[in-house]
Image (tube, coloured by chain):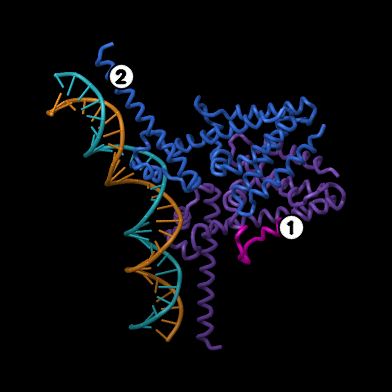
Chain colours: A purple, B blue, C orange, D cyan
Amino acid sequence: MTRQQRLREGSQKRREQQKEDLSQLILKAAGEIFLRRGYEGFSLRQVAEEIGYSPGTIYLYFANKDDLLRALAHQGFDDFSRMLETVSASSADPLDRMIALWRGYVVFGLQNPAFYRLIFMERPDFFVNDQAENAPKWEEAFAIWSSVMNDAVRAGKIRADDPVKTSDAIWSALHGIVALANRMPDFTAERALGAADAAIEMIIKGLRP
Amino acid sequence: MTRQQRLREGSQKRREQQKEDLSQLILKAAGEIFLRRGYEGFSLRQVAEEIGYSPGTIYLYFANKDDLLRALAHQGFDDFSRMLETVSASSADPLDRMIALWRGYVVFGLQNPAFYRLIFMERPDFFVNDQAENAPKWEEAFAIWSSVMNDAVRAGKIRADDPVKTSDAIWSALHGIVALANRMPDFTAERALGAADAAIEMIIKGLRP
DNA sequence: GCGCTAAAATGAACACCGTTCAGTGAATTA
DNA sequence: TAATTCACTGAACGGTGTTCATTTTAGCGC
């Protein structure tokens, strides 16, 4: 390899590094503004303002607003997935683990309202219709969810005549709690946690074998 | 009363009538566009375009976009309330009535996605913080809801240790189903109805005395 | 019928938004 | 040093909600 080739390679690498840096800077600023202003208040022009670039520059790193929003959603979903994994490893008892998972879902939703809204309320299409390899796998998270439920069924802790419908019903109950807390002014986190306890108790008793 | 006075009164009435007419025309056009374009696509300029007036005219009849949107939400909530009343009178048996009410909630949500989204997902603040007399009463709808539940409790059909938490949990479950069906591309109405059946069965069994 | 007056409606403007693209200027290459 | 590539800009386009001076319209007394 000649000296010139090495020089060119180094230069190219440096450029790519800078490009990657700015991409990350945009993403970081976007995350801050998204948390600060919420889903509706989030705008590309503010992100550009924040990092001191013109609005057009963002389009050199992200295809459009949705693309940037999708990147944020993926980050948020990674956190969500990690939480699921952590919680599902918290206990050896199948029933305890399942309850911990459900409670973890609600707590995550209450503690990360902006991201929960983005992922599960405003733009679930980012995940459902996303074939990209780098996309966090909706299915993987759901795999944890259903494996925990399967374990409880196998251990004879709960009955699930129709696993899909039952799983949907449980998910809906938890999602409903978080969604109401997210949008209704008087559905406080405290009230949501109370509803979650009642729901979990109801579900467990309702699915008793 | 002189002839002139009568003339003036008639004229004034005619004017008020015209004002009322245009107000209703705006509301009607707004409803159509809201249904056609959904919550996000709805714009005042389109409403003005539809009825052949300039955008500013709408502000002579509604304070702003929220005010018009609130009027739509109130209409939608009236439909919702009527449905609750109708359904709650459908059966004499407390348990049947309660189940019919729950199922009616889900069906209404699935059949009126735009309005359900407006009322329960995007702008519940229209109701929670609305002190106006003409506002549909959130509390009245909830009164039907909880009276039906109370009847079932008194009839010994279900147990409700903590009525508020239990009621919140049930509402959350139903809302979760409708909310998921509303926003998730692959959560079809059919799937939602399946989840609703599973949820209702789970709840009934979970609350068995 | 004719001015006068008050109400109604307009349309241009403002400040935003996402998005595009010809043009600029700096860094790299030859 | 000259040429070229590249990141970046900033103005523009069409859209949004909202305001307000201005114009048009309609009813009134005469």
Q: Mark 1 points at which residue?
A: A143
Residue at figure coordinates x 38%, y 32% from the top left: B21
The answer to whether A68 appears left or right of B163 in the picture is left
Any magenta on residue A133? Answer: yes
- Residue A131 on the magenta span: yes
- Foreground disc of the pair 1, 2: 2
Q: Which amino acid does label 1 sit on?
A: Ala
Q: Which mark is residue B9?
A: 2
Q: Where is residue A165 in the image (x, y as percent from the top left)?
A: 73, 49
Residue A57 lies left or right of residue B116; in this view the side is: left
Q: Which chain carries label 1?
A: A
Q: Mark 2 lies on which chain?
A: B
Residue B48, which numbered label? Answer: none
Q: Quadrant where the C terminus of chain A lies?
A: top right
User: Nearest the camera: A122 or A164?
Assistant: A164
State which region is magenta.
A127-143
Which x, y percent locates residue B102? Answer: 68, 36
